[in-house]
Image: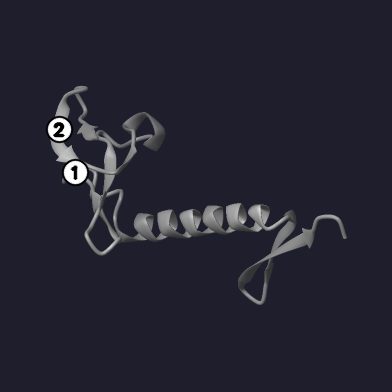
Amino acid sequence: MHLIGYHSDTRPEVANIVIRRSEIGSASNDIGFAKNADGTYTAIISDYDSHQHNGKWMTAVKASYATKRFEKSAQEQGLKFLSREKVNGKMVTKYLKQGV
C-alpha cells in the first residue's frame, strides 16, 4: 500500500506494513516497511522524519515487536501473563500455564 505524505498526498513509496502518520505523533509522513525477497524488512522513512525516527527508534520498534510477538505465542500455548520486572538489568516476564 502507498505511504501518505504530510499534505495527505499519496507518496510513490509502497510498503507491506504501514504506520500511519496519525499514529506516530510528530512525524510528517507515514512510515513503511517493505518486505524483501529474503523475508526481512526495509524501513521506508522520509528524509524529513529520519532525524527523529533513526537507528535508536528502530531498535525500540524491533524490541516492541519482538515482545508482542512473544506474548502472542505464549498466549497461543496456553500461558497467562503474570508480571514483568527488571532483574540484574534484564527484563524478566513471568507466565503461568493455564489450568495448573
The residue tagged 2 is: 11
Q: Residue furthest right?
A: 100
Which quarter of the figure has residue 95? bottom right
Residue under circle 1? 46
Q: Residue at x 43, y 57 (%)?
A: 60
Q: Nearer the viewer, residue 61 or 37?
A: 37
Dividing the picture into quadrants, the one containing residue 91 is bottom right
Which one is in front, 92 or 47?
92
Q: Is residue 10 above or below residue 76?
A: above
What's the residue at 19%, 40% (across, down)? 14
**Mark 1 Cα within 10 Å, few/some/many (few <14, many 20+)?**
some
Q: Is residue 59 left or right of residue 66?
A: left
The N terminus: image quadrant? top left
The image shows residue 20 at horizontal and vertical percentages of 33, 33
Residue 15 place in picture, x, y as percent: 24, 43
Secondary element type, mark 1: loop
Q: Position of residue 89 (x, y in %)?
A: 61, 73
Say which mark, if any, is on residue 90: none
Q: Amino acid at mark 1?
A: Ser
The numbered mark, 2 or 1, whose residue comes first in the sequence reads 2
